[in-house]
Amino acid sequence: MTSEGPRADRPRRRRSFTVAEKLRLLAGYEQAVAEGDGNGYLRRNGLYSSLMSEWRRARDAGLLEGKKPGQSVGRPSGDQAEIARLRRELELANRKIARTEAALDIMGKVPLLLFERARSGLKMIMAAR
C-alpha cells in the first residue's frame, strides 16, 4: 500500500520555500478551502495545515511583504501578531455586516411583496364578481 502524502516513501530533506512560493501556495490553499478541497490541496502539494497557519500569520502580520529571495522571514512580534489578529477580526466583522445588510434588504422587501400579492389577489376576486 503506497500513500502519496508528504512522507510516503521515506523521510525527505526539509524543503524551503521562497516568499513568492509561500504566497502562491497559501492563495491556492485558501481557494481550495473555499471550494471545499483544502485537505486535498495539502495532500497534492505535500504540505501540512500547520504550515499554512504559520504562513497565514506571517502574511497577515506583514512579514512577507518586501522580502528578497533567501531573506529570513522570522516570527511576528507581539504587535504584529495583534495587528494580524485585529485585521482578521475586522474582515470577519465586515463579512457579517454585509450579510446582515443583505438580509435586512430582503426583509424590507417582503412587506411590499406581500402587499402586491394581496392586492393582485383582491383584483382577481373583484374581477370574478
Image (cartoon, helix red, strand yellow):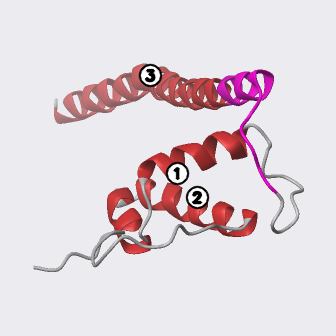
Q: How many marks?
A: 3
Q: Residue at x 69, y 43 (%)?
A: 58
- Say left or right for 49 vs 85: left
- Say left or right for 2 vs 52: left
Q: Main secondary structure of the magenta part?
A: helix
Residue 18: in magenta span: no
Q: Position of residue 66 (x, y in %)?
A: 90, 56
Q: Secondary structure at mark 2?
A: helix
Would you call the spot at circle 1 few (<14 residues within 10 Å), some (14-19), or many (20 or more)? Answer: some
Residue situated in front as seen by the camera: 59 or 1: 1
Task: Mark 1 or mark 2: name the one nearer the start of the chain.
Answer: 2
Residue depth check, mark 3 versus mark 1: number of the one nearer the observer: 1
Amino acid type, label 1: Met
Task: Mark 2 or mark 3: name the one nearer the start of the chain.
Answer: 2
Amino acid type, label 3: Met
Residue situated in front as seen by the camera: 21 or 10: 10
Q: Residue at x 51, y 21 (%)?
A: 104
Mark 1 highlights which residue? 52
Circles 1 and 2, Cβ within 8 Å, touching? The answer is yes
Q: CA distance from mark 3 to mark 1?
A: 39 Å
Q: CA distance from mark 2 to mark 3?
A: 38 Å
Q: Position of residue 18 (x, y in %)?
A: 72, 67
Q: Position of residue 69 (x, y in %)?
A: 83, 69
Residue situated in front as seen by the camera: 90 or 15: 15
Q: Secondary structure at mark 1?
A: helix
The label shown at residue 86 is none
- Quadrant occupied by the C terminus: top left
Give the residues drawn in magenta, as a range.
72-87
The label shown at residue 26 is 2
Residue depth check, mark 2 versus mark 3: number of the one nearer the observer: 2
Mark 3 highlights which residue? 107
